[in-house]
Image (cartoon, grey):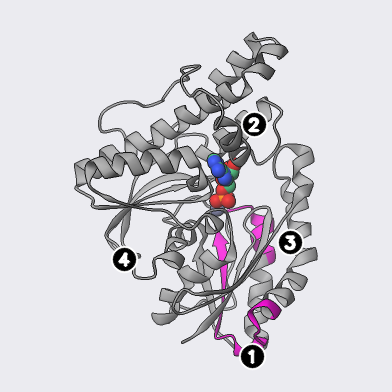
Amino acid sequence: MFKILAFETSCDDTSVAVLDSNFKVHANLISSQLTHEDFGGVVPELASRLHLKNIMKITKVTLEKAKLELNEIDAIAVSINPGLIGALLVGVSFAKSLAYSIGKPLIAVNHMLGHVYATKIKHPNLEPPFLALVVSGGHTELVNFHSFEDFEIIGKTQDDAAGEAFDKTAKLLNLGYPGGPIIDEIAKKGNPEFVRFPRALNRKDNYDFSFSGLKTSVRNYILKQNSDFIKKHLADIGASVQAAIVDSLVSKTINYAKKSNSDKIIIAGGVSANSMLRKNFKEQANKLGVQIIFPALEYCMDNAAMIGAAAVDKYKRKEFADLSLNAFSKKGLRFI
Ligand code: KG4
Ligand code: ZN
């Protein structure tokens, strides 16, 4: 059995984890940067500085929690893309120095692939082929995995990501950041049919997504109402926006699953924590007779355990990076 120390600093969470070759998590610490709440979104420069300030301490505490010394670690894994370049560089530089100083291999991980591998923590035997919907704050991709190294992108967002649609709606309604969990919560008491917001690219055989029209539509709707009405119907408006986002994600994924005869669908990324998304996907998948798999809730949002999980197979294949490894911001799952 081998143990991996993993780092995730692609956005506003500094996370360090230890995971073993059986996908067992020994420790997974996440320090969320609250500073960004004041700005209604992540400020890249502040994110990098906070990663730098915290990464050493979080690494020490992670090893303590895992009851391990640094010399008991077999490899260092780090997410290198996509993400905020300054933020990624902190993790990559730190991981490189650590790998060099303890003389252990370095493993580069694509953050999106990490989200998909997060499901392996609960389902260690899960293997492709499967269809995966990866929905986060920066990405929305429908991907057909033939194997973990051989996959094709079936559809992606043409503009905003699904999580971004939640975040921007929450900002328009002055609800705080990140918007997804807040809207998820208030929507539980609302009527999802209160307003019919648009479902974009709603055409047969179109598997791309678009959420910027929804954002404009929500904005126009809010501007037309007075503040008492908004206050009274906050839950209804939140539930209606959530329904529009969830409908697009579920219908396109299920339609492609039907077309391609997929028998397994994985939903990953921060938005996969959404309760309505989980409920609707489960209902549709049951009807279709396909298996639907989500990561455990604690591994949906950015975390280093998922980076360690993606590194397990790379360790077995001896797919190691050298010390010239660099971070890059290029979006998507395909690039590494
Ligand atoms: O995967 P993630 O932690 O970071 C990125 O890689 O972007 O995803 C963060 C996104 C945010 O947009 C957040 O609002 C959204 O995931 N999110 C949710 C929920 N929890 C997090 N969206 C809807 N419902 C949730 N329960
Ligand atoms: Zn993410």
Image position, residue 154 (x, y; %) = 32, 45
Residue at x 45% of width, y 31% of height:
210
Whole-percent x, y for residue 34 in the image:
76, 49
Between disc 1 and disc 3, whose residue precedes? 3
Q: Indicate left or right for 284 with 329 as reference.
A: left
Residue bearing mark 3: 51
Q: Is residue 46 left or right of residue 160?
A: right
Tell me whether the residue at label 4 lies in contact with that at label 1, contact meaning CB atoms closer than 8 angstroms: no
Q: Name the kind of residue labelled 4 in the image.
A: Glu
Kind of residue at disc 3: His
| Magenta-highlighted residues | 64-90
Q: Residues within 10 Å of mark 1 (few under 14, many from 20)?
A: few
Is the CB atom of the residue marked by disc 4 within 8 angstroms of ligand 2's nearest atom?
no
Q: Nearer the viewer, mark 1 or mark 3?
A: 1
Q: Are marks 1 and 3 in contact (CB under 8 Å)?
A: no
Q: Which residue is mark 1?
A: 71
Distance from label 2 to label 3 (Cα)? 26 Å
Horizontal and vertical percent position of residue 298: 56, 57
Q: Would you say residue 196 sits in the magenta stretch? A: no
Q: Mark 1 belongs to which amino acid?
A: Asn
Query: Which label's residue is closer to the chain start, 2 or 3?
Result: 3
Which label's residue is closer to the chain start, 4 or 1?
Answer: 1
Circle 4 sits in a helix, a strand or a loop, which is it?
A: loop
Q: CA distance from mark 2 to mark 4?
A: 36 Å
- Using the numbered discs, state the Cα–Cα distance from disc 1 to disc 3 in whole angstroms: 24 Å
Q: Which residue is mark 2?
A: 170
Q: Reading the chain from its start, which is encountered first: label 1 or label 2?
A: 1
Dot 4 corresponds to which residue?
127
Mark 2 residue type: Ala
